[in-house]
Every structure is written in C-alpha cells, then in structure tokens.
Amino acid sequence: MSELDPVRSYLRSRGAALHVVEGGLEGLIERWRRAARGLESGHGDFDDYLNDVDGRQILHEVLARLDAPLRARVRARVRRIDQRVRARLEPVGECLWGARAAREHGWSPAEQWWYFHRRRPPSAE
C-alpha cells in the first residue's frame, strides 16, 4: 500500500474533485507551486487566488494526517513554497471568506495565514 493512499482516501471523503484525488499529495504540492509561480509572474485574479488558497487549506489538512517522518519532509517542501507566496502578499484585516467562515472553520491568521492575506497590488513603475 502506498503512503499516499491515506491522502487520496481523505480527499475522497472530503468530496474533492476527481483530478485532485488522483493527484494526491504530489498534486496538491504542485498546485501550490503553480500558485507561487502565478503570483511571481503577476498572472491570475482574486478568484484564482481564492481557489489557490482553498487548495493550500486542503494541503494543510492533509499534512496533519501524515505520519511524522513524511509530514516533516513534506512540510519542509511546502514551507519553501509558502515563503515564495508570502513574498507576494499583504495582510488584510479579516478573512477573505469573511468573519463567519473563519469562525465556522476555526481559521486564524496565525495558522491559516493564506486566508488573511491578498495579492500585493503591482507596484507603479
């Protein structure tokens, strides 16, 4: 049995789209890496960003379900991507999905920072 099977099982139980389930852990990481590239290149809009951070939330949930050695390895990879993403963001005073969603899901700016930041506007040149 593959170490990714529990990830796919969780994604299925969460009702994730088939392509997300099939991509498993590596697919989630790759989607977050693509989100970082999109931010760095200035591509995408607010809706794209919301989709990307929802994917980051799923990755967060999956990380919590991995065994400790795998979680440590994956977390190191995700942190490098997070650093790239955060370099392109600015904090906002509330959750992007609203205060009610943050309360219902238990999201906090410290733990789920991606929901409390937005793309930094392009600088005037």
Image (tube, rainbow, N blue to C red):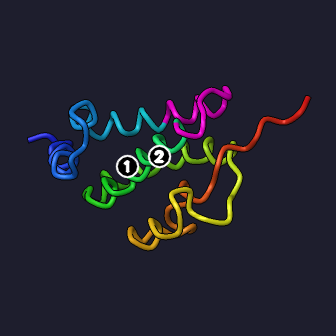
Q: Residue at x 26, y 59 (%)?
A: 65
To which quarter of the image does residue 20 belong?
top left
Q: Quadrant of the N terminus?
A: top left
In the image: residue 10, left or right of residue 77: left
Residue receiving disc 1:
59
Q: Which residue is drawn at 15% across and 47% down?
A: 9
- 96 relative to 111, above or below: above
Q: How many marks?
A: 2
Nearer the observer, 79 or 11: 11
Question: Which x, y percent locates residue 59?
Answer: 37, 49
Q: How crowded is mark 2: few (under 14 residues within 10 Å), some or many (20 or more)?
A: many
- 57 relative to 102, above or below: above
Residue receiving disc 2:
78
In the image: residue 30, left or right of residue 113: left
- Check whether the beta carbons of the residues at disc 2 and disc 1 lie within 8 A of each other: yes
Question: Which x, y percent locates residue 5?
Answer: 15, 43
The stretch of residues the image draws in magenta is 33-47
Can residue 45 be found in the magenta stretch?
Answer: yes
Q: Disc 2 marks which amino acid?
A: Val
Q: Quadrant of the C terminus?
A: top right
